[in-house]
Image: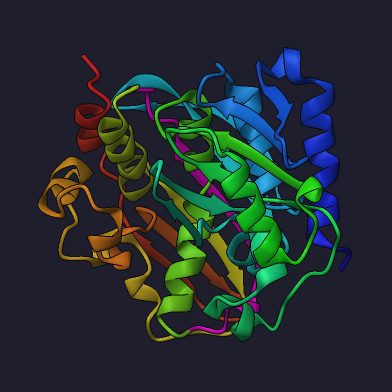
């Protein structure tokens, strides 16, 4: 496989070339790194969100939008499909890079192929994958735009020059935040399998879908809605090579918290994302098709909870 950072850079170049049409603002930092504002101060949009979801999966997934309904209300949904799920979703799309700095404070989550240049997370060891390239992309989810501290930190960890760092950035409470969150249904299913001890290299293809949560500029509301969209509206189909006795624990309905809106779950954790058990982050409904074996249909969606979370009237 070619470098996933090289593939992601091609998509970043597209975002820069069509920045006006996408309502994205790219600019260069003093360090030479490039920030692309997808939805912090910039407006962004549906197309920008889908392109960023492609960047986050290093161009190894097809991302598209469709219209569906929730409790009778027309609601946009995002679909993501990939034949390279382990690398695209766990080695790239997963938000596995915590970005926390002080003086001045900065809190963010990084996803994208830059993680594969570091390759220290458990997923990389299990999948036996790492990348090498002299340019890199780390998508930053934060209410603040990344500065030179972030760029130089990424460059140092990735072993490249800061001028080779590209940082697409967005807030959870933005259109791009809602769209890219909806594109994570498949990633959550795969990560649950990984956490349950399944060899994710046996997953041959994944197709995921989830509704796009209405945008709120209140980050707490946005964080709750985007997670509700996945846990109560996310649907995933996986094609796998080997059966597994723990498949029933993949969907969100397998957890004790199922049926509670994420606003309550996060409030109980004092809105500390890292204090919430990882098992609560899962899609609502999952079909697992074992090649030349059984097909498991698991979980259920909850349209009424989503309608309440989305404040549909």
- Locate residue 5, reporting x and y percent: 79, 56
State the residue lying farthest toward the right: 2
Q: Confirm whether residue 62 shows in the render.
A: no
State left or right for residue 111 relative to residue 297. Answer: right
- Locate residue 280, reporting x and y percent: 28, 60
Residue sitting at x 38%, y 43%: 105
Quarter holding residue 121? bottom right
Relative to 296, residue 97 above or below: above
Q: Nearer the viewer, residue 257 or 141?
A: 141
Residue sitting at x 66%, y 53%: 152
Residue sitting at x 67%, y 52%: 57
Start and end of the magenta stretch? 198-216
Relative to 38, residue 148 above or below: below
Relative to 192, residue 135 above or below: above
Relative to 120, residue 281 above or below: above
State the residue lying farthest toward the front: 103
Quarter holding residue 258? bottom left
Q: Nearer the viewer, residue 63 or 295?
A: 63
């Amino acid at each position: 496989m070619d470098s996933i950072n090289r593939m992601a850079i091609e998509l970043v170049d597209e975002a820069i070339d069509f920045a006006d049409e996408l309502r994205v603002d790219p600019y260069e930092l003093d360090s030479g790194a490039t920030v692309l504002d997808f939805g912090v101060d910039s407006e962004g949009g549906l197309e920008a969100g889908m392109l960023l979801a492609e960047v986050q999966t290093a161009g190894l997934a097809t991302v598209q939008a469709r219209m569906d309904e929730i409790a009778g209300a027309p609601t946009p949904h995002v679909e993501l499909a990939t034949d390279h799920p382990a690398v695209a979703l766990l080695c790239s799309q997963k938000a596995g890079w915590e970005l926390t700095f002080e003086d001045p404070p900065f809190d963010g989550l990084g996803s994208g192929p830059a993680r594969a240049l570091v390759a220290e997370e458990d997923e990389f060891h299990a999948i036996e994958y790492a990348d090498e390239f002299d340019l890199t992309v780390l998508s930053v989810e934060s209410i603040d735009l990344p500065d030179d501290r972030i760029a130089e930190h990424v460059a140092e960890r990735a072993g490249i020059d800061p001028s080779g760092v590209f940082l697409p950035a967005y807030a959870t409470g933005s259109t791009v935040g809602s769209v890219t969150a909806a594109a994570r249904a498949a990633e959550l299913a795969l990560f649950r399998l990984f956490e349950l001890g399944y060899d994710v290299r046996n997953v041959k293809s994944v197709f995921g879908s989830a509704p796009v949560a209405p945008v709120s500029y209140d980050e707490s509301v946005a964080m709750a809605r985007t997670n509700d969209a996945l846990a109560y509206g996310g649907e995933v189909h996986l094609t796998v090579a080997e059966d597994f006795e723990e498949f029933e624990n993949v969907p969100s309905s397998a957890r004790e918290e199922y049926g509670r809106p994420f606003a309550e779950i996060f409030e109980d954790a004092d809105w500390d994302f890292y204090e919430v058990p990882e098992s609560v982050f899962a899609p609502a409904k999952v079909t697992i098709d074992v090649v030349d074996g059984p097909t498991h249909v698991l979980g259920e969606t909850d349209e009424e909870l989503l309608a309440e979370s989305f404040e549909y009237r």
